[in-house]
């Protein structure tokens, strides 16, 4: 059964519950959805296609939704393969179909498709261009680097619909945890779009002038009503790198468990001092994507790691590297190192963090040697006190 979003907009996307590792790096235990839409008017527009894993199922849904009609346009918002793998197939099925995309998308198209004839069917659009289907007039808005350079979004004033490409997406199949959109949307945003807060803010400013009733992303549920308002609120916070939740995030990487035990002790100290929220991630065992998410969510972070090969234990190094490439910034970070004979973790962590924008290192840096002892608790108390004052 094809889902009607409005009188003229149909949902023709596909869930893939077997996709447990999105982009070969992000854990998606529920699977992933690849959204696509159809606008049925005097002329018919298909809004994006699907991933190669689901193209056959997507084509079946497209044919059912068309009810014998022939599409006039395929709007390509984003050329990444998880949304554009069906382009060649749908063009072969409908020889008169016109591809509508940004100039940058046309330039990039030969990277993914061998058929040079596809380029002759492309109609490029720029900021503010329109396409009339009948009662629906589509307005195209360029959104470069949200999160690829060719991205654009489309506004349909007739239904107050913003087709937002990867913006406002989330991990998981379409209806998974739909009532708690923020949980997986946050992890999705900071791992997929986190580096590009500036471009996302630019898109939000453009969208502020539109009468948006619903956002239709390429991943996750359609956003309407209270969920729409909350999504816009959170995207404003996230794109500005502002603090969403007051509290402290503790990320630890422990070889034999001693640093992990110190992390648990520090968490209890912080709670006793009235910290409103303490979150923790075991970088050796927990999902790295969730660690990235929480690092951005909270304004204060503690990095606790064992020394290793005159540097820092690799799980912590990997975490800090990911924060760096995702443009981690405007945060206060405390350091706890552990080293039996030549502690080196703090020096390495400090150097990595000092290369990031407006990251303040909280003093004192705590050095542990092996198992935490009673005297070490005083160091953690002092660190917690300094962290809470910020």
Image (cartoon, grey):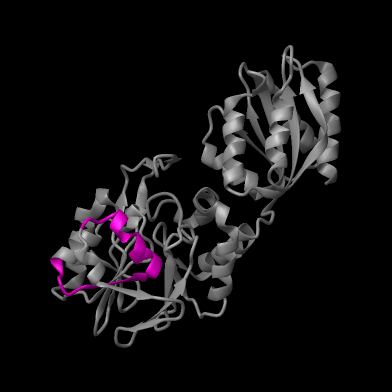
State the residue at coordinates (73%, 41%): 354
Judge by depth and name the residue closer to the eye, 205 or 374.
205
Q: Position of residue 388 (x, y in %)?
A: 82, 42
Position above or below: 23 against 313 = below
Quadrant of the snapshot with the N terminus? bottom left
Can the viewer see residue 273 in this picture?
Answer: no
Residue 37: quadrant of the picture: bottom left
State the residue at coordinates (63%, 18%): 309
Q: Position of residue 130 (x, y in %)?
A: 39, 83
Residue 342: quadrant of the picture: top right
- Magenta residues, as a range? 93-114
Judge by depth and name the residue closer to the eye, 77 or 311.
311
State the residue at coordinates (21%, 60%): 88
Position above or below: 201 against 388 = below
Q: Position of residue 200 (x, y in %)?
A: 55, 63
Q: Is residue 6 left or right of residue 65?
A: right
Going by the picture, which residue comes out furthest to the top? 341
The question of residue 99 being in magenta is answered with yes
Can the viewer see residue 278 in this picture?
Answer: yes
Residue 215: quadrant of the picture: bottom left
Q: Position of residue 228 (x, y in %)?
A: 51, 67
State the residue at coordinates (73%, 25%): 337
The question of residue 100 being in magenta is answered with yes
Q: Is residue 336 left or right of residue 135?
A: right
Count of marks, rendered view? 0
């Amino acid at each position: 059964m094809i889902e009607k979003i409005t009188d003229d907009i149909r949902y023709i996307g596909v869930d893939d519950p077997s996709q447990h590792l999105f982009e070969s790096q992000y854990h998606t235990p529920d699977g992933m959805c690849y959204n696509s839409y159809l606008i049925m008017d005097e002329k018919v527009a298909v809004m994006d296609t699907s991933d190669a894993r689901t193209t056959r199922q997507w084509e079946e849904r497209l044919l059912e939704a068309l009810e014998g009609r022939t599409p006039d346009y395929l709007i390509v918002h984003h050329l990444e393969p998880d949304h554009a793998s069906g382009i060649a197939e749908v063009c072969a099925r409908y020889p008169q179909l016109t591809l509508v995309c940004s100039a940058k998308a046309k330039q990039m198209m030969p990277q993914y498709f061998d058929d040079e004839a596809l380029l002759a069917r492309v109609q490029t659009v720029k900021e503010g261009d329109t396409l009339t289907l009948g009662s629906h007039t589509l307005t195209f808005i360029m959104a470069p680097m949200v999160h690829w350079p060719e991205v654009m979004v489309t506004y349909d004033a007739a239904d107050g619909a913003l087709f937002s490409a990867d913006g406002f997406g989330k991990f998981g199949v379409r209806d998974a945890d739909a009532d708690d959109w923020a949980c997986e949307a946050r992890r999705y945003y900071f791992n997929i779009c986190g580096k590009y807060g500036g471009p996302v803010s630019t898109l939000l400013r453009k969208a502020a002038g539109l009468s948006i009733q619903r956002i239709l992303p390429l991943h996750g549920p359609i956003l309407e009503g209270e969920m729409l308002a909350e999504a816009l609120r959170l995207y404003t916070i996230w794109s500005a790198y502002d603090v969403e939740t007051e509290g402290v995030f503790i990320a630890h990487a422990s070889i034999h468990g001693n640093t992990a035990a110190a992390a648990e002790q520090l968490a209890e100290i912080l709670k006793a001092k009235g910290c409103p929220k303490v979150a923790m991630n075991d970088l050796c065992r927990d999902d790295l994507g969730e660690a990235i998410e929480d690092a951005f969510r909270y304004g204060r972070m503690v990095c606790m790691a064992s020394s290793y090969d005159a540097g820092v234990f690799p799980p912590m190094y990997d975490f800090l590297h990911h924060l760096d490439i995702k443009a981690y910034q405007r945060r206060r970070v405390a350091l706890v190192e552990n080293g039996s004979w030549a502690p080196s973790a703090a020096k390495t962590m400090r150097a990595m963090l000092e290369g990031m924008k407006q990251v303040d290192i909280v003093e004192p840096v705590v050095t542990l040697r092996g198992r935490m002892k009673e005297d070490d608790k005083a160091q953690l108390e002092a660190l917690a006190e300094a962290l809470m004052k910020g």
